[in-house]
Amino acid sequence: MPTSDAANTNFPGLDGALRSPSNPNHLMVIRPIKRTVRVHVGDELIAETQNALRVMEMGKSLYDPAVYIPASDVMVTLKPIDKSTHCPLKGDASYVSFNGEEIAWTYDRPLDVSRQLAGHFAFWPDKVRITEGD
């Protein structure tokens, strides 16, 4: 198995990858999205930002990238629901709904390694429409 330095040499996009303290093969890369990001539920615009983050994560498999929107740029009230999960790289996730349907999650108190995600929501891509660009 290559070391993380060797992996970064072979895959320069992994430079600066954040790694799980308990499993260095579980990693993520967080990059700012340099375009306007909008989130719609149906025809309703519920979030718009120029400060979104894209999270690319590899753990047991390569996960689909997730877009994280600052809570301050969400224009609707998202209601907490009674659900939580744990990620050994990001921490404990809380889930929220809009109009009675679960649509997003957040890491209110992320682990130190992923503190950039604090105050952000990630939306389920099959429940919203996310667009990038002007």
Image: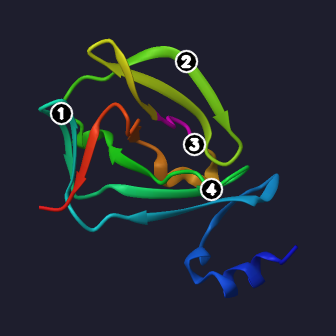
Q: CA distance from mark 3 to mark 1?
A: 23 Å
Residue mark closest to the camera, 2 vs 3: 2
| The C terminus lies in quadrant | bottom left
Label 4: few (<14), some (14–19) or many (≥20) C-alpha neighbours in 10 Å: few
Q: Is residue 28 above or below residue 4?
A: above
Q: Is residue 98 above or below residue 29?
A: above
SS class, disc 2: strand
Residue located at (38% from left, 40% from top): 125
Residue 45 x/y as whole percent: 14, 36
SS class, disc 1: loop
The residue singled out by tag 4 in the image is: 62
What number is the disc on residue 83? 2
What number is the disc on residue 110? 3
N-terminal label among 2 and 3 = 2
Residue 84 x/y as whole percent: 58, 23
Answer yes or no: do the residues labelled 1 and 2 have beta carbons within 8 Å? no
Q: CA distance from mark 1 to mark 2?
A: 22 Å
Q: CA distance from mark 4 to mark 2?
A: 24 Å
On the rendered structure, is 11 left or right of 71?
right
Label 3: few (<14), some (14–19) or many (≥20) C-alpha neighbours in 10 Å: many
Answer yes or no: do the residues labelled 3 and 1 have beta carbons within 8 Å? no
N-terminal label among 4 and 3 = 4
Identify the image quadrant of residue 15. Answer: bottom right
